[in-house]
Amino acid sequence: MEQRKRVTQIKEVHITDHATGEINSSQVEKTFSLPQEPAYVKFYLEDIGHIHGLTKAESDVLFSLSRLIGWDGIVSVSKTRFEKSVEPLINIKYQTFKNTISKLVSKGIFTRVGRGELEANPYLFAKGEWSEIYKRRKSITLHISYNDEGRRLFTEIK
C-alpha cells in the first residue's frame, strides 16, 4: 500500500506595501515529508539475472552496464561508450550489444529515456539519496504477476 505524503509545515507569505499597509499578494507554501526509506537487503546482479531469466550474454551486458549507472539512474549506451567501457570487458559486437539491450528493456531492467540512454529500474538499482530514488520510483509503475507460465514483469513510465 502506498504511503501518502504528510504535510509537515505550512507557511503563509504576504507581500505588503509598507506605505499603505495593503497586502499585494499572498501565497501558501507547504512542506511535505517523504516516506521513510524502506528496508532493503543487498541484491547481487547474479540474483537479478536468475530472477529475470537472463542468459549469460544478457548477464554479462547487465554487469558491464551496472558499473556505468550514474547517480541519476541513467546509463549511456552510445557506440562510443560501448567501445570504451563495454567491449573491452565482454568482447562482443556492437549489434549484439544493441540486441541484448533490447532484451533487457523488454524484461523491465532498463527503460529507454533518450537517444543512447537508458534508465535503470529504480526498484532494482538504487544509487544516491533516498529522496531522489523515491522520485524516480514514483515515475514508474511496476507490475509483477505470476501464473502457470511463470513470472511476468511490466513497467510503465508515468
Image (tube, grey):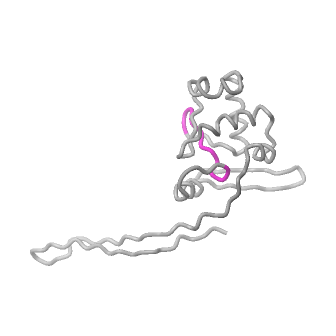
The answer to whether 82 is drawn above or below residue 66 in the figure is above
Q: Nearer the viewer, residue 39 or 131?
A: 39
* Residue sitting at x 55%, y 33%: 115
Q: Reply yes or no: does residue 4 show up in magenta.
A: no
Q: Reply yes or no: does residue 121 show up in magenta.
A: yes
Residue 47 image position (x, y, % from top left) = 78, 47
Residue 24 image position (x, y, % from top left) = 20, 71
Residue 67 image position (x, y, % from top left) = 62, 38
Q: Quick one: which residue is furthest to the bottom in this view? A: 21
Q: Nearer the viewer, residue 13 or 23?
A: 13
Q: Is residue 42 left or right of residue 12?
A: right
Q: Is residue 7 left or right of residue 93?
A: left
Q: Quick one: which residue is furthest to the front in this view? A: 42
Q: Nearer the viewer, residue 58 or 60?
A: 60
The answer to whether 130 is drawn above or below residue 86 in the figure is below
* Residue sitting at x 88%, y 49%: 149
The answer to whether 109 is drawn above or below residue 76 in the figure is below
* Residue sitting at x 81%, y 35%: 55
> Quadrant of residue 62 in the image?
top right
Q: Which residues are magenta?
A: 114-124
* Residue sitting at x 79%, y 39%: 54
Q: Quadrant of the N terminus?
A: bottom right
Q: Quick one: which residue is furthest to the right in this view? A: 148
